[in-house]
Amino acid sequence: MMRSSMDSDAFKTRRSAEASTRLFMLCVMFRYRETVLNELARHGIIPRDDTPPQLIHEFINALYVYEIRSLRKQMRAGLIPKEDYARRVEELHKRYPILSLPLGYWIEIE
């Protein structure tokens, strides 16, 4: 199947927009709040100045989801009593307060 010139132009425009976004992201520097850096360090994360907050948020969220699923798996396997499960989930949730903070507050605007 052949592409029409219109399809080709749309493809080039989309590729150009993606390249521009990547170039923009390479030039952007983020200054994280000290409190955010401290919370991230608790999880072993030390972002560089060019690391987008969204990327870190996705990583932390994936880590949280992994731990929640691990707890559920342990409960289903009988390693954690059902009565104890809710308390453990609450404790886990308290270890990730950074996830409830909007991304706009992660960085300082100069």
Image (tube, helix red, strand yellow):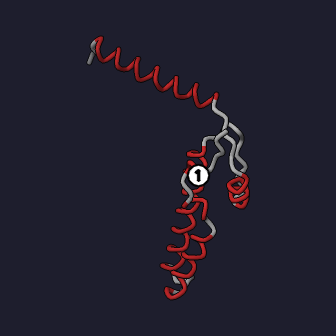
Q: Amino acid at mark 1?
A: Phe
Which residue reaches farthest top? 5
Horizontal side of residue 86 vs 45, given as left or right: left
Image coordinates of residue 59 in percent, x first then y, are: 58, 52
The residue positioned 60% from the left and 71% from the top of the image is 94
Q: How many marks?
A: 1
Secondary structure category for the residue under label 1? helix
Image coordinates of residue 20 in percent, x first then y, are: 52, 23
Image coordinates of residue 15 in percent, x first then y, are: 45, 22
The residue positioned 58% from the left and 25% from the top of the image is 23
Image coordinates of residue 13 in percent, x first then y, are: 40, 19
Q: Nearer the viewer, residue 79 or 21?
A: 21
Q: Nearer the viewer, residue 75 or 110?
A: 110
The residue positioned 49% from the left and 85% from the top of the image is 82
Q: Quadrant of the C terminus?
A: top right
Q: Quadrant of the N terminus?
A: top left
Horizontal side of residue 16 vs 7, given as left or right: right
What residue is shown with label 1? 59
The correct choice, above or below, for 5 with respect to 36 in the image is above
Horizontal side of residue 109 vs 6, given as left or right: right
The residue positioned 37% from the left and 20% from the top of the image is 11
The local crowd at label 1, few if under 14, some if 14 to 19, many if 20 or more residues have their Cα within 10 Å, is few
